[in-house]
Amino acid sequence: MARIPPVTRERVRADLRSIFDEVSSGPGGIGTGPMSVLKYSPEMSRRAIPLFNYVRNESSLPQKVRELAMLTTARAKDCPYIWNAHVRLGRQAGLSDALVNALRDREPLPPMSVEEAVVIKLGMEFFQTNRVNQGTFDAALEQFGPQGLVELTTLMGFYAMLAFNANAVELGLPHEMAEPPLPV
């Protein structure tokens, strides 16, 4: 059970309800995930939605890379909701069971593509040290180019913000779980 009840129109200030209606009328409606938490601040949600849509669905990065970045962030931030929302999508995008399971269980990672290794190294290094060393940066720049590198770091940053909200309110897990939960 979340620490705050799911957002509804009645739970936001009356002067913000028209904005709440606007942000809730699009894809996903009010929803139940971390983006729904942002709707307690309708104006902030309205401003965040375009960036969310871009980094999640429209980025120049391949879907497999985006899903791995989301899973890497979920694992680094111990966010069960984001992990469980994206693990199936990551597998569907082409991430191997061995890689996903090792990432989930914090076990040694199996052999993987250079692209996958760069995503995980960049994310884990940053989340552990708040910095990225020159070698890691150079590898990511070579793999994804300047645009892809910036989109990758922004995607991870955005999902870290979602994880912060999901974990702070103790957002429950989705009911339709087909995967083992993220051990935290």
Image: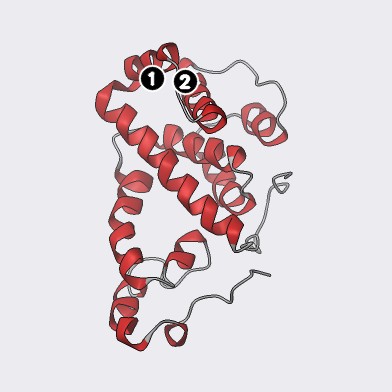
In this view, 141 is above or below 64: above
Residue 21 figure quarter: bottom left
**Contact check, label 1 and label 2, Cβ < 8 Å:** yes
Q: Position of residue 136 (x, y in %)?
A: 44, 16
Q: Position of residue 156 (x, y in %)?
A: 44, 39
Q: Is residue 62 visible?
A: no
Q: Position of residue 102 (x, y in %)?
A: 68, 29
Q: Is residue 132 left or right of residue 74?
A: left
Neighbours of disc 2 within 10 Å: few (<14), some (14-19), many (20+): many
Reading the chain from its start, which is encountered first: label 1 or label 2? 2
Labelled disc at residue 140: 1
Neighbours of disc 1 within 10 Å: few (<14), some (14-19), many (20+): many
Q: How is the image coloured?
A: secondary structure
Residue at the outermost left position: 147
In this view, 137 is above or below 26: above
| Residue at x 72% of width, y 26% of height | 107
Q: Is residue 95 left or right of residue 131?
A: right
Q: Amino acid at mark 2?
A: Val
Quadrant (top left/top right/bottom left/bottom right) for the C terminus: top right
| Residue at x 48% of width, y 53% of height | 162
Residue position marked by numbered label 2 in the rendering: 118
Foreground of the two, 88 or 164: 164
Q: Position of residue 60 (x, y in %)?
A: 28, 35
Q: Is residue 140 left or right of residue 15?
A: right
Q: Is residue 121 visible?
A: yes
Residue at the outermost top position: 135
| Residue at x 33% of width, y 75% of height | 25
Label 1 to label 2: alpha-carbon separation: 6 Å
